[in-house]
Amino acid sequence: MLTIDDLEAGFHDGAKPPERWRLGVEHECPAVDLKGHTIPYHGPSGVGAVLGALAEGSDWKPVLEGDNTIALAGDGASITLEPGGQIEMSGRLWSSVHQARAEIDRHIDSLVTVGRKLGVRFLASGTVPKSTLETIDWMPKRRYEIMRTIMERAGSLGHRMMKQTATVQSNFDYADEADARLKFRLCMALSPILVAMSANSPVIEGRLSGYKSYRAKVWTGTDPDRCGLLDFAFDTEGLFRAYTEYALDVPMYFLARNQALIPVWPVSFRQFLAKGHDGHQATLDDWHLHLSTIFTEVRLKTYIEVRSADSQAIGLVVATPAFVKGLLYERDCLEAAWDLVGRWSMSERLEAGAEAARHGLAGRAGRHRLSDFAADLLGIAREGLNRQGQIDAEGRSEAVHLDALAADVADGRCPADRIIEGWEGPWGGQTDRLIEALDYAG
């Protein structure tokens, strides 16, 4: 029989000495046809065909569910499908942002090549800008079949989250529980800043949404049991036990048995641990699967996963991961960043998050613009990356990956501002012009 101590132990097992700290980047993007409509799974230009073309002549190995390819597996990396057909690349663990950027470049080059062959566009956007929710096909994965039913009951915007949003996530290591606590709380506190800097989703279903990050807005209406900010992150000493206790009370989605998923919602993991379910008893694999269904702004596994950024244009994909790395992997920088954002109350953090979603860098946290906080934090992150000494072939530190982001912050502009200007200006509200502008093929 598993105990709560057994569940907590996994977080302790994730601890690594600083010389083994790495960075992982996960990049999602919508896949659409030449007219900007999302593509189905089946068909000569469908998502299944995209996966097949990516695998052809490469080291990617197809992963099947029934007769359908639902992922590609590589050496420490994977390409998977989001529920509405968004393509996600979960990259390898790298010691430098330079390496992560090179991996992203290769991946997007592959997407563009396949897209030209199949008549598919891949968009640098935090939302699907044209297709309506009802016209987007569900991908043929049992996981999503179960989740879509639960999402209808758990929140008002869950289906939009699943089918119409895309993000860039980044993963970071910790030395021990004390280090994890400092990093976890800072990343939670940074959430409004990350949303504001990366806001890149103002258009939904062919219209301006009124939000610069509609993706961030959608998450506020998805599922309050497993999303948002965690208040205990800011005041607990024992992060691993506190997170374990929190996750125990989150309703489960499913169990995996004999290569099949069994729905169990709304049974909590605490109830499952104590009583089992339909003859099944809790295992560590069940716990790890359950942790993957928690969608807070920062997620704890055997690493810290930061989830607050919209998907980006290629020059900005690794900007927010670089920003966070600069803050987290130098202790002085971590503490300096906390000095800037650590004093906000929970209500102030929520208000700042709402401001960021609606107004981007022009939003406010109290009397100050979010762009002011972003500028100060970027200075700290730049120092952190310079200290870390990861130099590319041209002799540049990882801070080079902050340059485009820093230029935006200095102007007080996020990517959504450029989209809105084009939409209200030369594009004349034409979605086709927007699709052309967002296309990774250029």
Image (spheres, helix red, strand yellow):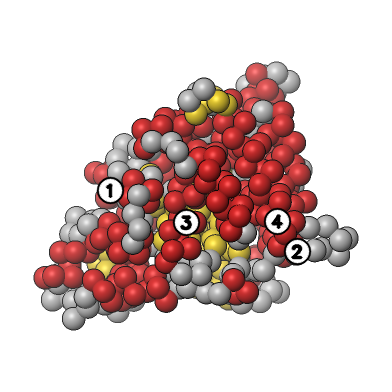
Mark 4 Cα within 10 Å, few/some/many (few <14, many 20+)? many
Cα distance in 3D space between marks 4 and 3 = 18 Å
> SS class of the residue under badge 1?
loop
Residue 36, x across and y down, in percent: 60, 39
Q: Is residue 160 left or right of residue 315?
A: left
The reply to whether residue 370 is visible in this rendering is yes
**What crowding class fits label 1: few (fewer than 14 Cα within 10 Å), some (14-19), or many (20 or more)?**
some
Q: Secondary structure at mark 4?
A: helix
For badge 2, the amino acid type reads: Gly
Residue at left offset 50%, top offset 53%: 306
Q: Label 1, label 3: how many angstroms apart (C-alpha)?
A: 24 Å
Can you identify the residue that label 2 sits on? 389
**Badge 3 is on which residue?**
182
Q: Are marks 2 and 4 in contact (CB under 8 Å)?
A: no
Q: Amino acid at mark 3?
A: Leu
Amino acid type at circle 4 is Leu
Alpha carbon distance from label 3 to label 2: 23 Å
Q: What is the spatial separation of the Cα atoms under label 2 and label 1, in whole angstroms?
A: 41 Å
Disc 4 marks which residue?
A: 385
Residue 68 in picture, x, y percent from top left: 47, 67
* Label at residue 225: 1
Among the two numbered marks 2 and 1 on one chain, the one whose residue lies closer to the N terminus: 1
> How far across and how far down the image is residue 179, in percent?
48, 63
Percent from the top left, x then y, of residue 205?
A: 50, 31
Q: Is residue 425 left or right of residue 285?
A: right
